[in-house]
Image (cartoon, rainbow, N blue to C red):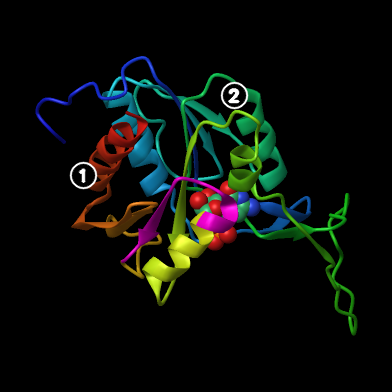
């Protein structure tokens, strides 16, 4: 952590999504993923240290609430979208770091599904909303930042994703082991090209990314 943090985001409002989502199958079962939330929480703390008013919309994680940050706990992608929409008015920057489940179970069972000899349950899925693309499509959107995890052709796929979601900045995870790890390596992709942030802790990368975002805000 820097000894002195410049207040790059003083007076700015920032909304961040972090962690996995949890999509229920029945009252005791569900579908989730291995996102730890560390990168999103580090960004929330870095934005707060840079002077921003920060709302952190978080799926289930084992992490403590960052100091001075307003955390909203959610489980499903639909709840995450609703919480973001409830806080997006007058927001300057939206950073989507959450690993949102692409699909949810169409009709979660109200009762625990019983095991029955000789029969297997089958699940039907429906697509979840794309939270980042939804916010980017608002008439007067905040500055939107997305993340991309790709196993190959990172810059090319990240730029394609940036265009598809119609956002100014997308951040590629260079380290393929980023999920759950304490450090990472990032590739910032915007209309001007790409910029590499070399391997460092997620805390240090978060400070560098917040500074890069504040420069792009002008
Ligand atoms: O399309 P893909 O999931 O690869 O895009 C990743 C980016 O989009 C991340 O920033 C993620 O937080 C965001 N996203 C989202 N809602 C979804 C899926 C992805 O906000 N349903």
Give the percent coordinates (x, y) of residue 90: 54, 19
Residue at disc 2, secondary structure: helix
Residue located at (59% from left, 24% from top): 87
10 lies above or below 134: above
Q: How many marks?
A: 2
Give the percent coordinates (x, y) of residue 125: 80, 64
Residue located at (57% from left, 32% from top): 141
Residue at far left of view: 3
Choose between 55 and 153: the one closer to the eye. Answer: 153
Q: Which residue is mark 1?
A: 204
Q: Which residue is mark 2?
A: 87
Left/right placement of residue 143 relative to residue 194 reads right
Left/right placement of residue 66 relative to residue 167 reads left
Q: Is residue 170 magenta?
A: yes
Residue at disc 1, secondary structure: helix
Residue at far bottom of view: 118
Choose between 121 and 204: the one closer to the eye. Answer: 204
Crowding at mark 2 (Cα within 10 Å: few <14, some 14-19, many 20+)? some
Segment tinted magenta in the rendering: 163-174
Choose between 134 and 43: the one closer to the eye. Answer: 134
- Determine which quarter of the picture holds residue 116: bottom right
The label shown at residue 95 is none
- Determine which quarter of the picture holds residue 42: top left
46 lies above or below 27: above
Crowding at mark 1 (Cα within 10 Å: few <14, some 14-19, many 20+)? some
Give the percent coordinates (x, y) of residue 16: 48, 36
Residue 149 in view of the camera:
no
Residue located at (85% from left, 58% from top): 106
Where the N terminus falls, by quadrant?
top left
Q: Is residue 44 magenta?
A: no
State how far apart marks 1 and 2 are (Cα).
27 Å
69 lies above or below 29: above
């Amino acid at each position: 952590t820097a000894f002195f943090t410049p207040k790059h985001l003083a007076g700015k409002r920032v909304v961040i999504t972090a962690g996995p989502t949890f999509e229920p199958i029945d009252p005791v079962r569900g579908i989730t993923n291995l996102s730890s939330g560390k990168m999103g929480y580090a960004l929330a703390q870095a934005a707060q240290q840079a002077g921003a008013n920060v709302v952190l919309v978080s799926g289930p994680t084992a992490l403590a609430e960052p100091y001075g940050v307003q955390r909203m706990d959610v489980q499903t992608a639909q709840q995450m979208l609703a919480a973001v929409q409830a806080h997006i008015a007058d927001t300057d920057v939206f950073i989507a770091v959450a690993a949102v489940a692409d699909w949810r179970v169409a009709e979660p069972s109200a009762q625990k599904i019983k095991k029955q000899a000789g029969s297997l349950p089958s699940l039907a899925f429906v697509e979840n909303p794309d939270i980042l693309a939804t916010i980017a499509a608002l008439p007067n959107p905040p500055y939107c930042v997305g993340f991309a995890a790709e196993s190959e052709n990172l810059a090319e796929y990240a730029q394609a994703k940036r265009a598809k979601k119609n956002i100014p900045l997308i951040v590629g995870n260079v380290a393929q082991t980023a999920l759950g790890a304490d450090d990472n390596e990032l590739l910032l992709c915007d209309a001007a090209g790409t910029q590499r942030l070399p391997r460092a802790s997620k805390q240090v990368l978060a400070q560098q990314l917040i500074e890069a975002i504040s420069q792009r805000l002008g």
